[in-house]
Image (tube, rainbow, N blue to C red):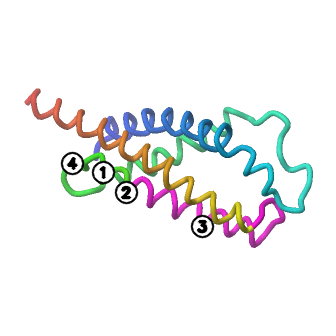
Amino acid sequence: MDAKRIVTGALVGGVAMYLLGYLIFVLAFGGFYAANVGSATGVDRDVPLQWAIALGTLALATLVTLAVDSRPGTASMAQGFVTGGVVGFLVWMGANFIIYGATNVQTLTRTIVDPLLEFVRTGVVGAIIAAVLARGAKAARVAT
């Protein structure tokens, strides 16, 4: 694990995760999320802070990169998908149930569905990161 691999995986993964997040959570399931808010009102921003969403996405992509790159050998895209999916699922399952237990901002249905959708997003990103890291490893072997 070196800094260049982590930065590369995090940046490529972060961009992919941001775009997939828009496609999944806004375009495909935006209506579901809007219909499954809790009893709290006025908690959603009229205009989301995209810089904050991008920064959080970059942090999660870095975590997925660390998990994929920590596997012994070079992870395949399938291994990257599973690793990324499990990381995203566990992070969001934990966060969502804590949020559900402490606040009124989402329903139980949303609490359960969100980590499942996140499994897909972080799984796809994990596969992308694995492919990018494998390509970098192959290029390093050829150069030596």
Image side of residue 132 versus residue 112, left or right: left
Q: Are marks 3 and 4 in contact (CB under 8 Å)?
A: no
Q: What residue would you read off at disc 1?
A: 78
Residue type, numbered disc 2: Val
Question: Which range is magenta?
Answer: 82-107
Give the residue furthest to the right.
41
Q: What kind of element bears circle 4? A: loop
Return the mark for residue 126: none
CA gap, disc 2 and disc 3: 18 Å
Type of amino acid at the residue the image marks with label 1: Ala
First-in-chain label (3 vs 4): 4
Image height of 40 relative to 97, above or below: above
Numbered badge on residue 74: 4
Q: Amino acid at mark 3?
A: Gly
Q: Position of residue 2 (x, y in %)?
A: 29, 42
Q: Three-letter amino acid code at disc 4?
A: Thr
User: Could you give the CA–CA distance between mark 3 and mark 1, rounded to whole angstroms?
Assistant: 24 Å
Image quarter for residue 6?
top left
Viewer-proximal residue among 83 and 67: 83
- Report which quarter residue 97 is drawn in: bottom right
Which one is in front in this view, the residue at disc 2 or the one at disc 3?
2
Residues at discs 1 and 2 in contact (Cβ within 8 Å): yes
The residue under the point 71% across, 65% down is 109
Give the structural element (helix, strand or loop) at label 1: helix
110 above or below 43?
Answer: below
What's the CA distance linking mark 1 and mark 2?
6 Å
Q: Which residue is mark 2?
A: 82
- The residue tagged with tag 3: helix, strand or loop? helix
Query: In front here: 110 or 95?
Result: 110
Residue that lies at the very extreme toward the top in this rendered image:
143
As drawn, the label of residue 94 is 3
